[in-house]
Image: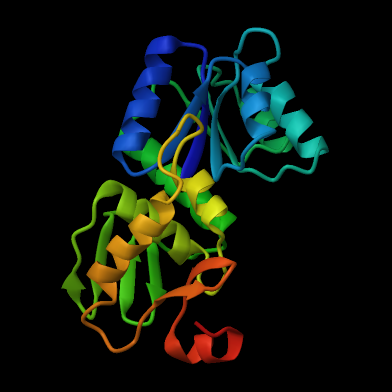
Amino acid sequence: MKLLIVEDDPDLNRLLKRETIRNGYSTDSAASAEEALLYLEQTDYDGILLDVSLPGMNGFELVQILRRRGDPTPVLFLTARDALEDRIRGLDLGGDDYMVKPFELQELLARIRALVRRSYQENSNLLIAGDLVLDMGTHTVKRAGKIIELTRKEYQVLEYLMLNRNIILSREQIEEHVWNFDYEGASNIVNAYITHLRNKIDKDHRIKLIRSIRGRGFMISTEEESHEKHTD
């Protein structure tokens, strides 16, 4: 999933970016609210990790701007402010969660997963399509009970498809969501990863879950659902 980190402490910014990428996220980072707005005007994110005490516009002011614009991107405040009134203010302004520094990385990752689940209206870390099961907590993927080994990017593409089960995603949507803002690679990168996933997930199974919709993109769907919604 795609995250935006907004943190003016360069060491913490680098740490959060490194660890979220290592844990399967496509992550961009900004050092100010003004820079964050530039990112948010050009791409969508599944969540924002937002420091409150930023130079210039602070985190609370940034959230106010986003909510006035109708931007529903979930926001997790990261701040040294531990006063009850600050936590209440952050949540009342439209924040979704609030963590006080210093914090444990594993708890932060768990809260990010909860943020993403709420955003996609998922009840657990398990995403299921037919006999395909993806666990967002452990990053394991199984089909018919058998573990499927995926690279980091293969997992990210599959996770995005699974969070949008039965919804057609264009190549542009997948590329924008799975690769970070600075990516400048091959134009057929999404097709290549879909091919890799098909070889690992669908090749030895009668029911093919990864579907191509001509001229529109790709989707995860069971055979019964696909008969009603599209043709290959």
Q: Which residue is drawn at 74% across and 34% down?
A: 66
Is residue 22 among what the camera can see? Answer: yes
Q: Residue at x 45, y 43 (%)?
A: 112
Query: Can you tell which quarter of the image residue 107 is in?
Result: top left
The percent coordinates of residue 225 (x first, y second) are 52, 87
How many callouts does the rendering have?
0
Q: Is residue 197 left or right of residue 227?
A: left
Query: Can you tell which quarter of the image residue 16 is in?
Result: top left
Q: Please tell me which residue lies in front, 53 or 129.
A: 129
The percent coordinates of residue 38 (x first, y second) are 66, 25
Query: Can you tell which quarter of the image residue 6 is in?
Result: top right
Q: Against 175, is 31 above or below?
A: above
Q: Which residue is drawn at 52% across and 12% down?
A: 8
Q: Please tell me which residue lies in front, 216 or 24.
A: 216
Q: In this view, does 145 lie to the left or right of 192?
A: left
Q: Please tell me which residue lies in front, 74 or 91.
A: 74
The percent coordinates of residue 50 (x first, y second) are 56, 27
Q: Please tell me which residue lies in front, 6 or 199.
A: 199
Q: Against 223, is 77 above or below?
A: above
Q: Residue at x 49, y 38 (%)?
A: 3
The percent coordinates of residue 123 (x first, y second) are 48, 65
**Which residue is at the far top?**
55
